[in-house]
Amino acid sequence: MNSRTAAWLIVIGFFWLASCHKPRTKSRDRYSQSDTARTAFSDSLLAHSAIEEIDFDYLTAKSKFSFKSRSQNIDNANVNIRIKKDSLIWLSVTGVGLEVARGIITPDSIVFMDKFHKEYYVFSYAQLSQQFKFDLNFPLLQSLIVGNLPIPRDDEQKFRREKDFLLLRQNQGRILVDNYIGTKNRKLKRLTAVEQPTRNTLNLDYEDFTQLNNYLFPYTSLLTLDVQSEKDQQYYQTVIRIKHSRVELAENPLSFPFSIPASYKRKL
């Protein structure tokens, strides 16, 4: 695979991204007074459960990026990441000891520079969402890297038990999002988003939780996207994995160097 294809697929891979509480059924004959008290206590915990999220000002990471679709495959590309929370994501892709691509991502747009071929691309989320048949946005991409909820929880959204998880269901326009929270560490372990009416589905799993400062940080994120083709109506799968080797949280501002030389040509 040439450097142009690898760089392009890395940025495309990144951008494939963008409940009512059920009371327990009670049997008056089977519940003792202590059972009732325990149930009330459990329901109270569910109603007031908090999700352990990572609070930071700035983040840096050295990571491996993998991408697999029916037509392309990238295995363990080197990516350096810098984030200003909720504002900016900076990416630097290296290969054979040289930087081949650089990207800058904001809540409004994405700019990607192919340094090998002296070209650059500018995207809006609306363009990418239309192209890939799934609503994409900055919070979802940041969540892929960090592991926080991409959609903030409001006070009316309640948890319910789902096997070994607490399930938080959120309705975001035409997308129904199920967040599966670990009962022991209260971390987001899995996110499932289903778009209506296409039934295009995104699954995001977090693994390798490791202590980072005062937080548990997921050092591996695995995204699986199943999207229906308009041509043959079949569903095709794309798999993206980010595996961090080093992550640091910082309070002091980071630099985000990004400038496009005048000689570079804009593509698309």
Image: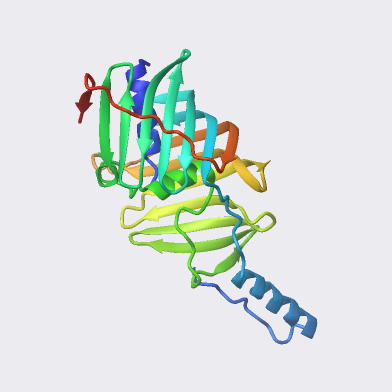
Q: Is residue 1 visible?
A: yes
Classify residue 25 as left or right of residue 256: right
Residue sitting farthest toward the top: 96
- Asked if residue 70 can be seen in this view, the reply is no
Dividing the picture into quadrants, the one containing residue 182 is: bottom right
Residue 137: image x %, image y %? Answer: 36, 48
* Residue 4 rendering spot, x and y as whole percentages: 32, 19
Q: Is residue 255 above or below residue 173?
A: above
Quarter of the figure that contains the N terminus: top left
The percent coordinates of residue 24 (x first, y second) are 62, 76
Decide which of 118, 182 is in the foreground and name it. Answer: 118
Q: Quadrant of the C terminus?
A: top left
Identity of the residue drawn at 56% across and 61% down: 167
Q: Position of residue 233 (x, y in %)?
A: 28, 44
Using the image, determine if residue 78 lies above or below residue 251: above
- Residue 169 vs residue 216: left or right? left
Q: How many numbered tags mark residues here?
A: 0
Task: Write the residue at 59% across / 59% down.
Answer: 51
